[in-house]
Image (tube, helix red, strand yellow):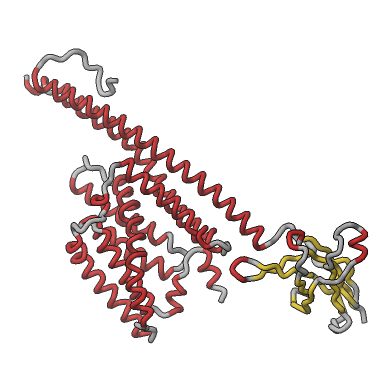
């Protein structure tokens, strides 16, 4: 393939030979660089795809490790005297979860969700595993007014740390009157 | 007329140069992508993977391994030898000579700051880091010089250009290498400043004496001096990436 010039038959001396040499060399050079660029580009694209896949996988692993989406629970009762509900990890039902009560974004109390809940067994949410919890609020002497109540599951996170996973998406509101 | 006779040959030569330039442009574009890809691997590691604190720490190495594979493949395809990259004893002495003055000035500045701030701490940990850090430095210098700087030089410096233009474009490549080295140390401003200066000096030395062992040694010694000299409020635990932002809250 002639890439440099039209170049018909040339018969005159060394000058023409040099031109032909340049033509062939540059054509080879271009071909080589073009092939090299293509192979490098393929490698870059492959690496980018592998990196993207890895990033997605790592993010998913981290999300599951820190905020186990399988955690189930409910804050069922909030009144001036108590906060009750249930929480469990379906992948580790034998282990009762530690739950913490926060009122107005402040830690108030911790307990273990290990109460037997017959109603949950009846509702076929569980067979025998106890995972109910109850916090008594009357001991806290809350000020009159509205208070935001949230219960978190203390979930073991990577490298020995722990995270708090909220049971309810939104905090519950309890109103204390005089 | 001899001038007319040589005209077709001259035209052929110009055309040949133009074709080479077009081919090089495409290769240059891919070379830019190669550099971006390696920088992205570093940024993904320090801004996303490390902060996730995954259970299996080896997962933090995956982007680096991918980048290393890309770099090794690039060397293989381009036909670059270990000797060309700087893994050789050649230029070792010359590189050390070139490094001597900048290291002396840098070392004196670091020790001066440490003395002034009362934070000099040459304990056994310093000597342990002097033994370990040159290997870590060698790896970083390989990425910075043998890959990034060499690719930047390919992008900026045309061998067909005149000497003055080549020198100017080489300076641009050196500065860009230093800037990229500083970029991956963001947002720790102290490290950004230190690595910008150090990166430029190391690339300048590599341009004159391409020896990675000397540069790795210099990198290790200067890193150990930085750790032993700078006060913690300035060094900020040498954290980079997202962890540095996290560090600022303590």
Residue B169, percent from left and from top: 27, 49
Residue A67, compared with residue A56, is above or below; it is: below
Can you name the residue that lies furthest to the left here? B1
State the image quarter where residue B130 is shown: bottom left
Q: Residue at x 83, y 65 (%)?
A: A129
Q: Residue at x 64, y 66 (%)?
A: A157
Left or right, B121 with respect to A128, comes to left
Q: Does residue A159 show up? A: yes
State the image quarter where residue B193 is shown: bottom left
* Front residue of this view, candidates B134 and B175: B134
Left or right, B100 with respect to B189, comes to left
Residue A45, compared with residue A74, is above or below; it is: above
Q: Residue at x 40, y 52 (%)?
A: B68
Q: Does residue B168 show up? A: no
Q: Residue at x 86, y 64 (%)?
A: A128
Residue A107, percent from left and from top: 75, 77
Locate the C terminus of chain B by quadrant.
bottom right
Left or right, B243 with respect to A68, comes to left
* Front residue of this view, candidates A98 and B28: A98
Can you name the residue that lies furthest to the bottom here? B118
Residue A115, percent from left and from top: 86, 71
Total labels drawn: 0
Residue A60, percent from left and from top: 63, 54
Locate the N terminus of chain B by quadrant.
top left
State the image quarter where residue A21 is shown: top left
């Amino acid at each position: 393939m002639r890439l440099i010039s039209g170049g018909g038959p040339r018969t005159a001396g060394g000058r023409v030979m040099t031109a032909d040499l340049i033509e062939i060399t540059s054509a080879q050079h271009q071909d080589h660089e073009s092939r090299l660029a293509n192979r490098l580009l393929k490698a870059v694209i492959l690496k980018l795809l592998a990196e993207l896949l890895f990033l997605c996988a790592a993010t998913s692993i981290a999300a599951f490790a820190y905020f186990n989406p399988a955690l189930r629970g409910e804050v069922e009762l909030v009144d001036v005297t108590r906060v009750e509900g249930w929480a469990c990890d379906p992948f580790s039902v034998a282990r009762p979860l530690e739950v913490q009560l926060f009122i107005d974004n402040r830690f108030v109390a911790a307990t273990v969700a290990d109460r037997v809940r017959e109603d949950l067994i009846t509702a076929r949410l569980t067979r025998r595993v106890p995972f109910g919890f109850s916090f008594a609020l009357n001991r806290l002497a809350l000020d009159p007014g509205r208070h935001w109540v949230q219960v978190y599951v203390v979930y073991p996170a990577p490298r020995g740390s722990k995270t708090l996973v909220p049971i309810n998406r939104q905090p519950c509101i309890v109103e204390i009157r005089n | 007329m001899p001038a007319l006779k040589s005209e077709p040959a001259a035209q052929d030569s110009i055309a040949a140069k133009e074709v080479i330039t077009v081919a090089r442009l495409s290769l240059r574009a891919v070379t830019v992508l190669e550099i971006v890809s390696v920088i992205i691997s570093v940024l993904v590691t320090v801004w996303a993977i490390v902060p996730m604190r995954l259970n299996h720490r080896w997962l933090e190495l995956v982007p680096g391994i991918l980048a290393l594979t890309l770099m090794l493949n690039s060397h293989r395809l381009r036909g670059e030898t270990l000797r060309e990259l700087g893994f050789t004893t050649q230029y070792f002495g010359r590189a050390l000579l070139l490094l001597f003055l900048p290291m002396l000035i840098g070392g004196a500045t670091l020790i001066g700051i440490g003395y002034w701030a009362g934070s000099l701490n040459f304990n056994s940990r310093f000597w342990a880091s002097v033994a370990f850090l040159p290997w870590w430095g060698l790896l970083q210098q390989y990425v910075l010089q043998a890959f990034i700087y060499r690719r930047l030089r390919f992008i900026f410096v045309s061998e067909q250009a005149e000497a003055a233009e080549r020198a100017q474009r080489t300076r641009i490549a050196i500065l860009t290498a230093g800037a990229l080295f500083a970029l991956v140390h963001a947002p720790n401003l102290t490290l950004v400043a230190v690595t910008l200066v150090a990166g430029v000096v190391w690339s300048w030395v590599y341009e004159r004496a391409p020896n990675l062992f000397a540069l790795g040694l210099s990198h290790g010694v200067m890193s150990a001096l930085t750790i032993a000299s700078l006060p913690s409020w300035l060094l900020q635990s040498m954290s980079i990436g997202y962890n540095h932002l996290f560090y600022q809250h303590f």
